[in-house]
Amino acid sequence: MESQRHALLTLICVPVLLAGCGTTTGGRELGVPQDGVRHEGAGFVITGRALEDGPGNLLETLVGKIPNFRIQRNSGGCPIIHLRGAVGLQGNPHVYVDGTRTAGTCVLTSLRTVDVSRIEVYPMGFTTRPGYGTHAHGLILVFMRSAGG
């Protein structure tokens, strides 16, 4: 009975504590659009000006826009991306482009920001968007501009 009560308290208290801890990003309110970057649910959405002001490739554009987003360069290999600041843990987020899972993070260096309409980054590795799995190292969803617009 005691362990059930502790489990119930944990289920109630942990989300409340986490919600209270993660209320700002770099002095900005979460959920409030900041030049095309906003917090939605468990992730961050990047659109508009936030894509346009990037240096050209998608990977470099994400740097500085997502809290705890870190890149570890590999000589000759795809970059290792850390979404939660845990640099000691090896692993990359799953990357999807228009609903198709890619083979790795290299695709983010080859996509141009002008061809992308929206990016969703889920550091905790889950989304309510249908058709996507979960992943312990996070999710990056890329939505391309349509060929006609």
Image (spheres, rainbow, N blue to C red):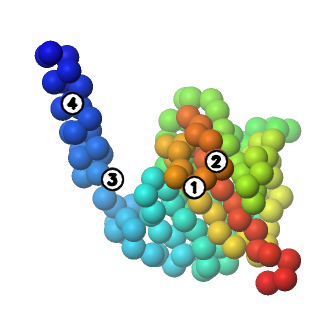
Give the CA separation, mark 2 to mark 4. Answer: 29 Å
Distance Cα–Cα, label 1 vs label 3: 22 Å
* Gap between marks 4 and 3 measured at Cα: 22 Å
Which residue is the site of mark 4?
A: 8
Residue 45: image tag:
none
Tell me whether the residue at label 2 lies in contact with that at label 3, contact meaning CB atoms closer than 8 angstroms: no
Q: Residue at x 19, y 17 (%)?
A: 3
Mark 3 nearby-residue class (10 Å; few <14, some 14–19, many ≥20): few
User: In the figure, 121 relative to 83: above or below?
Assistant: below
Query: Is the Cβ of the residue at disc 1 closer than 8 Å to that at disc 2?
Result: yes
Residue 38 x, y percent position in the rendering: 47, 68
Amino acid residing under circle 2 = Tyr
Q: Position of residue 146 (x, y in %)?
A: 80, 75
The C terminus, quarter of image: bottom right
SS for callout 3: loop
Amino acid at circle 3: Gly
User: What whole-number distance in Å separates the C-alpha atoms at marks 1 and 4?
Assistant: 28 Å
- The answer to which of marks 2 and 3 sits earlier in the sequence is 3
Q: Is residue 103 left or right of residue 63?
A: right
